[in-house]
Structures are given as C-alpha cells and as structure tokens.
Image (tube, rainbow, N blue to C red):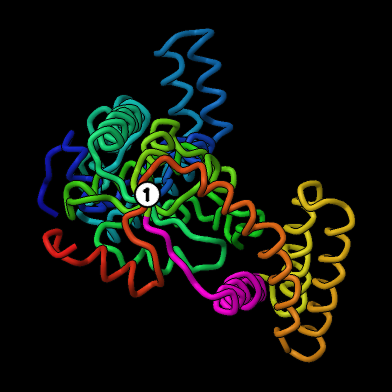
C-alpha cells in the first residue's frame, strides 16, 4: 500500500464520505462521533479509566508506561488485527483519536510495525468536531431555506426526498417527529445528530447548491434537539404547504406506523416477540399523549386501537386501524396543525398535492 500523508482537509473527508477509524475508547465513541466513523479502540473503557487516573496522580510518563502494560501481548495483537481488518476494508480511510496526539501516533506506529502505513487526521476528533460546529453555524446563516409543511399523514418526507436540495431532519434523527415517530433502531446521540446535520448541510451547499428544503419540525425530533438558530431561520422561511385527502392520509399513516413498523419489529425480534413489541409501541405512543387528549377521548381511542390490533393479529386485516387514525387526525392533530400554521411568519409559496409541490420546486425560477 502506497504511503499517504496525514490530513487536515476536513471538508474533503466529509464531502467524500471517507471512512474513519476512531481509536478512542467505546464510551467516547458512544458519546459522539462522525457518520463514516467506526470504533476500533486502542484502549477499552476500563483501560482508559485506569490510565487517566494514573496520569492525574503520577504524570504522563507513568500513564504511558501503564498503557503499554495494559495493552500488550494477546490484547495488543487483537487490537492490531482489528485495525488491519478495517484498513483492508477501507484502504482510503484515516484514523483519529481525541486530539490527534499520543493515541493516534501510537496506533499508527503499531500498524506501521505490522507492515502497513495508514494516515491519521491531524487534530483528531476535537478538530473535526470544531470544524463541523463552525461550518453548521455558517451554513445556517448563509443558506436560503424553504419549509415543507402539511398536516400529519400527508407524506411530507416522501415528497421532501423528491425536491432539488433536501435535508431530511427526521432521517438524520432516525425519528418521524411525533409521539408515534419512534423507530425500531435507536436514535443517535445529540452530538451524532449535530454532526450528521452539519455534514448534510455541507453536502447541500458544496455538492448541490440552491435553496435548502426542510420538513417543518418542532424543536425536538424525538430526543434530538434542533439548533436554536436553525429553528429561528426555519420560522422565518417561506412555506410549501402539502395537501392530501383525508382517506390518503389515513392510508399513509397506516402504511408507515402499522404495516411498516410491524414488519420492522418482527424482522428484528421474530414473529411472536416482534408482534408483542409492535403492539406495545403503538399503545405506548397513544398513552404518551393521554394528558393532551383528555381522559375520555384517550380511553375511546385506546379501545379502538386495541380492537384494531386484535383484528390484525387474528385475521391479518389492517383496515380496523382506520377508525382510530381518523379520529386522532380530525380531533387532535389537524386542529393543532391549523393553529400552528396560523402563527407561521413565512409566506406560502405554493400549496397543493405532491405533484404540485414537486413540479413547482423543480421548475426554473423564471417559470414560477
């Protein structure tokens, strides 16, 4: 393998989805890393903890000595094999630690001793994270935003993906944004979400250009919090209002939150356990908005949902879900959306069905 130089071209790393080997401890990786990063630690959490204590009590030299004692013999050989596997899969990648210092250099040396030259990211995680924070702030200020709005169930995410320069906030947060929005796989950490968003905005500006299309979201997408300045810019931005007949909205919600979710749970957990977990997901989502629904309305909707679930389990028929979906839309989500729309600051650019929105957004500016 030809030797490649270490890099501080952070923009190129993110725009080109360059694979990154994060040699920090698992606890650091879990707290936050980058979209193309994989964890291949030099030290595990316990080893890092012990070295950290030694550093505070006895200084750097003793800490380094202890680190070499802890990661030696078979353990060292296993770590090197893990790095070699990553390198074999990603010969164009880079490695990094927290600051691009001792852990990166040591990892790089051990890999070199095994006969492989592999470059590192200068400045490590800290520099990469700082670059993304600064670039996100810059993109939020300089971008022109257009907001895709619409009542619950209009299929906004489907339409968003067909617009010229979309950034899918729900996709980045791995959550659909409502009480029912949880997915089978977990959400990213807040830092991971911010890093994903920053990378998406960089690609939007550098690879596509033009107005950035975002789906209308509240401050929280599940547990992921949007940057406050982004929320302010979104509140001022012009709107594209997506409209769908009620029957189509019911079909979309049934497809997304019933048919797709039961498949996902059963694919993950098996048929029986997957069904039980899906059932719990649906009922729990309704229970989370009990206070806002009011006791009696919640009780009625829960009864409809339980009937629909029983019919689905016994007969495989999902039509029974229409009753609670319709009631929830008409009595809860639609009034809430109409109130929120009345308070929007942005002007409405276009209003209509999916075809109308997509055609307008893709039309040359002179023809609008």
Magenta part of the chain: 240-268
In which quadrant will I find the C terminus? bottom left
Please report the residue visible at 26 percent of the width from the left and 71 percent of the height from the top: 359
> Could you say which is closer to the camera, residue 281 or residue 51?
281
Res. 91 in view: yes
Q: Is residue 51 above or below residue 328?
A: above
Write down the residue under mark 1. 35
The residue positioned farthest toward the bottom in the image shown: 315
**Circle 1 — which element?**
loop
Q: How many marks?
A: 1
Instruction: Name the magenta segment's main secondary structure.
Output: helix
For disc 1, the neighbor class at 10 Å (few under 14, some 14 to 19, many from 20) is: some
> Could you say which is closer to the camera, residue 220 or residue 25?
220
Left-right relation of 331 to 82: right
> Could you say which is closer to the camera, residue 271 or residue 114?
271
Please report the residue visible at 41 percent of the width from the left and 13 percent of the height from the top: 60
Q: Quadrant of residue 364?
A: bottom left
Q: Is residue 321 above or below residue 48?
A: below
Q: Position of residue 15 (x, y in %)?
A: 21, 49
Q: Position of residue 266 (x, y in %)?
A: 66, 76
Please report the residue visible at 75 percent of the width from the left and 76 percent of the height from the top: 323
Res. 23 in view: no
Q: Quadrant of residue 176?
A: bottom right
Left-right relation of 211 to 77: left
Q: Position of residue 205 (x, y in %)?
A: 20, 46
Q: Position of residue 303 (x, y in %)?
A: 87, 70
In the image, residue 70 lies in the stretch drawn in magenta: no
């Amino acid at each position: 393998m030809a030797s490649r130089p270490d890099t501080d071209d952070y923009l190129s790393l993110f725009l080109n989805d360059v694979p990154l080997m994060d040699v920090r401890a698992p606890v650091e990786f879990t707290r936050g890393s980058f979209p193309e990063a994989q964890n291949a630690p030099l030290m595990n959490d316990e080893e890092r903890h012990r070295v950290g204590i030694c550093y505070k009590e006895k200084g750097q030299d003793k800490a380094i000595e202890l680190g070499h004692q802890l990661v030696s013999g078979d353990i060292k050989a296993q770590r090197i094999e893990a790095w070699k596997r990553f390198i074999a899969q990603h010969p164009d990648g880079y490695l990094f630690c927290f600051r691009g210092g001792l852990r990166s250099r040591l990892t790089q040396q051990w890999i070199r001793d095994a006969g492989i030259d592999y470059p590192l990211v200068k400045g490590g995680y800290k520099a990469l994270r700082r670059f993304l924070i600064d670039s996100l702030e810059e993109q939020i200020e300089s971008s022109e935003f257009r907001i895709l709005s619409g009542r619950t169930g209009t299929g906004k995410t489907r339409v968003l993906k067909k617009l010229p320069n979309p950034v899918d906030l729900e996709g980045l947060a791995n959550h659909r944004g409502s009480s029912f929005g949880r997915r089978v796989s977990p959400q990213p950490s807040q830092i991971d979400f911010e890093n994903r968003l920053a990378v998406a905005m960089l690609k939007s500006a550098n690879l596509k250009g033009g107005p950035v299309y975002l789906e209308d979201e509240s401050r929280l997408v599940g547990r992921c919090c949007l940057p406050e300045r982004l929320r302010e810019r979104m509140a001022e931005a012009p709107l594209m209002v997506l409209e769908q007949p009620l029957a189509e909205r019911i079909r979309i919600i049934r497809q997304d939150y019933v048919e797709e979710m039961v498949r996902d749970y059963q694919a993950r957990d098996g048929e029986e356990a997957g069904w039980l977990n899906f059932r719990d997901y649906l009922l729990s989502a309704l229970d989370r908005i009990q206070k806002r629904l009011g006791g009696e309305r919640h009780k009625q909707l829960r009864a409809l949902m339980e009937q629909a679930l029983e019919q689905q389990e016994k007969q495989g028929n999902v039509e029974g879900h229409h009753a609670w979906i319709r009631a929830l839309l008409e009595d809860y989500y639609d009034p809430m959306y109409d109130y929120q729309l009345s308070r929007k600051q942005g002007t409405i650019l276009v209003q209509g069905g999916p075809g109308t929105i997509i055609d307008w957004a893709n039309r040359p500016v002179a023809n609008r």
